[in-house]
Image (cartoon, helix red, strand yellow):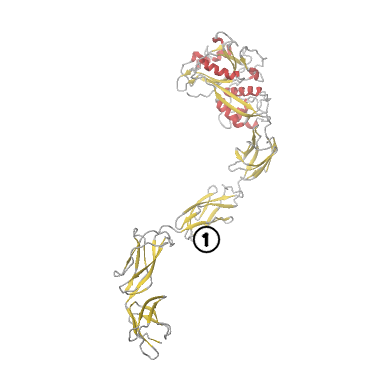
Amino acid sequence: MKTRIITIIACAFLCLAISGHAFAGSVNLISQLPYNSGLRDQGQCGNCWVWAGTGVMEMAAGTQSTGLNRASVQFFDSCEYTRSNFACDGGDQSTFASWYQSEGYAVPWSNTNAFYQDGNGPESPAVSCSSIGTTPDFPFQSIQVTPITTWGVGQSTAVANIKSVLNSGKPVEMDFCLPTSDSWNGTDGFYDFWNNGSQSSIWDPDSFCGQAYDSNNGGCHAVVIVGYNDNDSNTANDYWIVMNSWGTTENRPQGLYYMAMYVNYNCYYSGPDGGSALDFNAENYVFNNSPAPSISNLSPTSGSVGTQVTISGTNFGSSQGTSTVSFNGTSATASSWSATGIVCTVPSGATTGPVKVTTAAGPSNGVTFTVTQPTATHFSFATPAAATVGTPMNFTVTAQDSNNNTVTGYSGTVHLSSSTDSTAAFVPSSSTLSGGIGAFSVTFDNVGSQTITATDGTITTTSGPISVSASTTATHFAVSAPSHAIDGSAFGFTVTALDAKNHVVTGYPDRVNFTSTDVAASLPAGSTLTNGKGTFSATLNTPGHQTITATDAALGSITGTSGSINVAALSISGTVTNAKRKAMPGVTVSLIAGAQTVAQTTTLPNGTYKFSNLASGTYIVKPPDGFSPSTKQVTLGTANVSGVNFMQ
C-alpha cells in the first residue's frame, strides 16, 4: 500500500487561551497535557506530524513527572532540517521518532528561541538550530513507535485495538487522508466541520471511501486521539476524542473534535497515489529522569588521531558500563572513567566537531575538538613473509605518526632499496603515496633473509626479514666438464639445474638426456638429478674440440652445453731405468692433466712406457716415489713427445 507524507497547509486560526472544558467519555487523557491544548497551532506550516508526535511526547512527559511542561516544536523543525527535509514539507512518525532517538533529548518551549516561529509557512526554518537553547534538556531512555492493527481486521477488532492503547493511559497518533478538494473544502468537508461544527458534532469520513485519490487536491493530516466515549446505547453516537493542532474555534476552545468510532477502518482510495484512509500508531516515550552528563572542559582541545584527551565534567557515572564517548559522531575508546573525568584517545576517522558523552540519561552537551593532521615519523611495511627469487613480490608502504596512525596527508617521495640484496629490482623505485599508502613490487635476485628500506631523506625505515627462496622453475642447465680429454678415456662431468638468476633449483624433478658433438661418444643414459645436481661419466672417441649437452627430457627448451673439450690422440713416451741404467719393467707411471690423473700405464720388459691418444695441452708425468726427477711437465702441441725418462 502506498505511503503518503502527512502534510496539510492549514489556515491560521486564532489561538485562544480558554479555561478547561469538561468532556464526557469513557476515557479522557487530555489532563496529561500540562497546558491548554487549544494553544497548539501549526499555522500555515505543514508540520502537523511534528505537532502530533510532540503532543504524544508531552503527554508521556506529564505522566512521568519529568518537569517538561511543554516541548519545543521549533527544536525539531530547525534541527531536523540540518539533516533532512524541512518539517513544513511533511513527514511521518517513523522519521519523527528516529530523529529524537538520534538526538537523545527534548527541549522545553521556554528555552531560548525554542518557541514556535514557523507558523507563517516559511521555505526554511525561521531560526537556525544553533540559535535554540538546549539547557535545560530532557533526555530519553527509550522511544518506540508501533503501528496499531486496524487494516484487514473486523471493525470491532480495530476499535478494540485502539481502545487497548488508550486504556493503558497512552494517547494514539492518527493519520487520516481525504482524497479530493471537495472532501476538504466542500460543504461536507473537514474544514467546514472544524470551523462551523459544534463541539458535540461527530465527524464521519466514510462518505469519501472508494473515491480516487487526487494527488493535487487530496491530502493527509496527523492528529492525536486522547480518549473516547462509548456510553451511548447507539454505537452511531460513540466517538473518539481527537486533539488537533489548528488552535481553537468558537465552538472548540480546547482545539478538540469528535470522530465516529465505528467507521470503515478498511477505507481505501484508488489511483496511483491512493492508499488507506486511516492509520494509527502507539508511541511510547520513556524519559530518563537521571541528570544528563555535562562536559565542562577538554584537555587538549586539538590534536591528531591517537592523541590522549581528558574530558572533565559531571554526571558521567562511576564506571563506563554502556556509556560512550564520541568525537563528532565517531566512537572513542576510554582508558579510564569516573563520574567527573574520562581519559580517551582520538579515534581513527574522527573529524573536527563536538565531543559528547552519552549515558543512560542521554547525551551531554558538545564541546568542539579540532582534529589536526598528524606528522609522519616512520613507515610501516605490509609484506609477505616469504618470496621467490625472480618472481615479483607485491607490498605496501604506509606513512604513520608516532601513534601508528596513517598520515593521509603525507606528501613526501619514498625511495626504496635493499641493503641485503643490492640487485633487487623495485617497481617503482621511487613514488609519492596516495592517502599515506603506496603499492610497490620487488624482484629479489638472491636467496636468504632479505629486507626492504624506505626513505624520504628524513624518515628511514627498514622492513622485517623476508625469507627469499630459490625458484622452483629451472630455465637452463650448467654443464661442467674438463677442458681436455683423451680419446677413448672416460672422464667425469656435472650437470646443475638453474633458474633465471642462476640459483640452483634444488627441487628439479625431471629426467635429463645427454648428447654430444662427438657422435661416437659413450654417454650416460637419461637420469634425474639429486637436489638439482648430478655427476656423470662420459668417454669421447673422436679427436678435436667436442661438447656435451644436457636437455630436459620433457621440455626441450631447458638445456645446457659444456665448454669446449679438447680430445686428442698425441703421445708421450719414455724409459724407466735403475742407477746402473738397466731397464725396469712393471713400474707404474701416471699422467696428470690439471689436478686430475687422466691415465696410468706400466713399463714394458724393456723399461719403456707410452701414453697414447692424448689431446694437445700441458701434462705432468709422474713415476713412483724414489725416482728422479719426481715429475716432468710435458707440453703437447701438434707432435708427440718422447724421451721423458726417469732413473731410480
Name the residue furthest left. Answer: 520
Vertical order, 288 against 168 (above or below): below
Regarding mark 1 in the picture, which secondary structure is present there? Answer: loop
- Name the residue beneath numbered marker 1: 420
Which quadrant holds residue 237? top right
Query: Residue 299, how many percent across, how many down?
Result: 68, 43
Q: Residue furthest bottom?
A: 580
- The answer to which of 109 and 582 lies nearer the viewer is 582
Residue neighbourhood size for the residue with mark 1, other residues' Cα within 10 Å, grouped as few (<14), some (14–19), many (≥20): some
Quadrant of the frame with the C terminus: bottom left
Under mark 1, the amino acid is Thr
Depth check: give the residue in front, 28 or 268.
28
Q: Residue at x 62, y 31 (%)?
A: 104
Of 541 and 50, nearer the camera is 541
The image position of residue 77, as x and y in percent, is 60, 27
Residue in front for this viewpoint, 85 or 70 = 70
Whether residue 167 is visible to the viewer of this picture, yes or no, is: yes
Left or right, 273 with respect to 296, comes to left
Residue 473 picture quarter:
bottom left
Residue 588 percent location from the top left of the image: 37, 81
